[in-house]
Image (cartoon, rainbow, N blue to C red):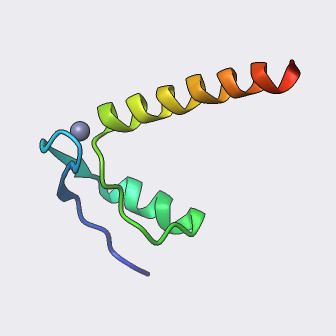
Amino acid sequence: MTEYKDKTIKCVDCGSEFIFTARDQEFYQEKGFTNEPKRCKACRDKKKAERNQNQSVNFQHNDN
Ligand SMILES: [Zn+2]
């Protein structure tokens, strides 16, 4: 069994440090994600919100 340790990562977007917790690392491993997160949660949420917004705009265009 792999032992995970909390890890500090610097966000590529805002430059602030965030913790990639042992629990999250285990979760990533379970999901088969090989990349570590590059952004803090705030920036990830922001990106996600932007993506969702763009998608809904595209969907509207497609409907017309
Ligand atoms: Zn950030």
Towards the viewer: 51 or 23? 51
Q: Is residue 33 left or right of residue 39?
A: right
Q: Residue 36 falls in which quadrant of the image?
A: bottom left
Q: Residue at left 42%, top 35%? A: 47
- Image quadrant for the N terminus? bottom left
- Going by the picture, which residue comes out furthest to the right? 63
Q: Residue at left 39%, top 79%? A: 2
Q: Give the percent coordinates (x, y) of residue 11.
A: 21, 48
Residue 2 in the image: above or below residue 23 = below
Q: Residue at left 38%, top 38%? A: 44
Q: Residue at left 40%, top 54%? A: 24
Q: Give the percent coordinates (x, y) of residue 9.
A: 19, 56
Q: Residue 61 falls in which quadrant of the image?
A: top right
Towards the viewer: 47 or 28? 47
- Image quadrant for the C terminus? top right
Q: Give the percent coordinates (x, y) of residue 30.
A: 56, 65
Count of numbered circles on the image: 0
Residue 19 in the image: above or below residue 3 = above
Residue 62 in the image: above or below residue 10 = above
Q: Residue 31 falls in which quadrant of the image?
A: bottom right
